[in-house]
Amino acid sequence: MSVLQIVRRRNRDQPVCHSSKPNPTPPIQGSQGRSASEKVYRRCRAWLRCTIRRGVRATLLGVVAVLVSALPAGAQPENQSENPLGDLLGGSDSPPQHPQHRLPTPAEAMEAYTTLEGWVHTWAPPGRGLSSPRVRAATRISIYQQGRLVGAATRLAETTTEDDLLATTASEAMHTAARTLLPRPDAFATEQLRLLAPDLTISLELAGPLTPLSKADLADLNAAIRPGLDGVAVRVGEEWAVAFPSELVAAGVLTAIKLPAMAARLLGDPTLGIELPQDLASRHSVTFYRFEVVHIAGVGAGGAAEFLVRGGRVVEIDEVTTAGLVRFAEELLGHFEATRVAGKMANPPQERRAGETPAPLDEESPRLGLMGTIDAARGVAESPIASPMQQSLAALSLVTLAETPRVSAAVRTRARILAHEIMVDLAHIEPGEIDPAADGVAAAVAWVVLARLDAAEDADLQPFFESCEGMLAAHAAAERGEITPGVAEAVLVWALAERAVRTGQDRGIATRDLRALYAATRPGGLVGLMPWLGWAELLLAGEAPVPAGAALRLVREQVWNHQLTLADTGLADRDLAGGVVFTLGAAVLPTWTTARPAALCATLLGDPRLTTPAEVSSEVVRLVRVMRFLRQLSAREAECAFYPRPRLVRGGIRAALWSPQQPPEASAMTLLAVCEFLRSIDRLENPGPDSP
């Protein structure tokens, strides 16, 4: 089954919000002393009162039925209202006896948010002075101060509860926030909170019906639960645990791991966390649920409310313009500047004015280069120092940006300076740092970067350049055995091609390795070696016809056949539109790896040998869709509102739309794709040699 069929099946299997089946949720209320992410629920004391009230109403209903049947035919009681049964049971405005939990409409969600905002931003007791909209199923309220989570609360509701769920949840969230903001309150605490309140960011998630997961769903949770869109709940007897989409995204944990952990906690046996969900359901009577939400938060201009999808604002296709892509490239540059492990820098990135170039580090400062993968939700680097390969890729993207037209001279200068700094940092091996010489592929990429930086004439970089040159020369002279196709082999072939074009050395060896790699790769597997294999082909072809031009065109066609469009995703998953995913891979939804083939397709756009004038328009449309998806992956203002260190993560590319991790290679490959697209657009509009 193709990925497109998977997406279509997922859309077809979505729960219907207006189902006539009653929601299986029993009367429940939040218990105290539990974490906000996995709050446990038990039957509330009001359940007995509700049961008695239902019995009384049923008795009154029977009496009314008897009285009506006793009336003569055609007779009507005096002053009969239009809804006597409604009057008898509490008025015509009372909710139905078994109101359905349904997904709130946008208007209802906005009404609830407006009410919540009135409480929080004035720090008024919830439920007083404002009419609280009816919230029926479940809700989560989160309060942030400059990206730091200071208060949160989650509540589930009974299907016929009369409690004010929104006000109850808001009261708990505000109470938590007050303890965080003012750990030592005094007589003026309320006034202090009212001064802080207008600057707080509010997030409101309203749940739809809880849908039980079947055995088939539990066996394939990746297909049953949409990451970042669906929340999950677990029930064991009368106890519940629930996790909303925002919590799942921030945790960065797979649902297949999260659900057993939630069940194990309810069962009181941590060892059960390694069991399969289907085994827990059959052996321990655990019931698993999913639910979708409407998410609204104050992340717009001036804190205006916006509807969010997977915790972010959907990038519209009309936002992808040449000027917008230039800004996108500048944001990626800013992200790399912010993630450099700087020592005694006179003007660090967070204090640098627009257009100001970075000042050099103090000679005694450690030269560590870039941080590793950033966990945006926690604002920390999972690895303090990026690997040599990650740093070399980042530097490659930066020197490419420095050679890209349509980008301002100031930005090109900043990009070149930062690439130079990264290479200097990489050349200095600090304690605990990996020697680039231990990674031949990273050294090959570094050679290309150093060559573009004219390292042979740079005293700081010349020794490093000579070391990388020696490694490439040794690789070219080495005996060749049977080739195993892989990305590493493709990168080495591309580096040899760059070296052959720039120096004239070992051109025959580079060509031989390129052809051997083509021959060893199975049909359909070439796309996994892009863009490196395609770039090597174009480099060695020069201005002559491209020998493997037909193969490259076939790869591009394969990429577009696996690109998701709005027709594939539907409105619910429209933020995935433009992404590319292949069924042979482990992922079933597009991730940052879309940038790899996109970079090659962007290069081919500007080559008239591979893209005819008649094909330009359709290729631009497809590439614009890709750029929209890559832009969606970046951390923008809406996403940064929920991150504790927005300056660190802003502009960086997340591994996926439902992941808070920002790998350096994801941002590097995206920047390469954006630069190649801008360069191709410039070639199409200005035929002839490039002139940055």
Image (spheres, rainbow, N blue to C red):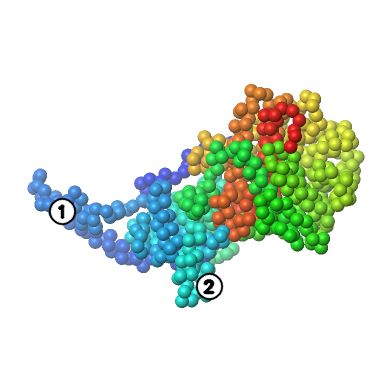
Q: Measured from the top left, where is residue 21 in percent x and y? A: 37, 48
Q: Looking at the image, is mark 2 or mark 1 earlier in the sequence?
A: 1
Q: Measured from the top left, where is residue 19 in percent x and y? A: 38, 46
Q: Which residue is labeled 2 in the image? A: 183
Q: In this view, does 116 lie above or below 657?
A: below
Residue 66: give its label.
1
Q: Mark 2 belongs to which amino acid?
A: Pro
- Name the residue at 42% across, 44% down: 16
Tell me the mark number nearer the camera, choosing from 2 and 1. Answer: 2
Left/right placement of residue 430 relative to residue 49 reads: right
Q: Mark 1 belongs to which amino acid?
A: Val
Left/right placement of residue 624 relative to residue 520 reads: left
Residue 559 visible in the snapshot: yes
Secondary structure at badge 2 equals loop
Q: Measured from the top left, where is residue 468 in percent x and y? A: 86, 46
Left/right placement of residue 515 relative to residue 594 reads: right
- Name the residue at 19% across, 52% down: 84
Residue 280: give its label.
none
Residue 374 visible in the snapshot: no
- Name the residue at 50% across, 53% down: 302
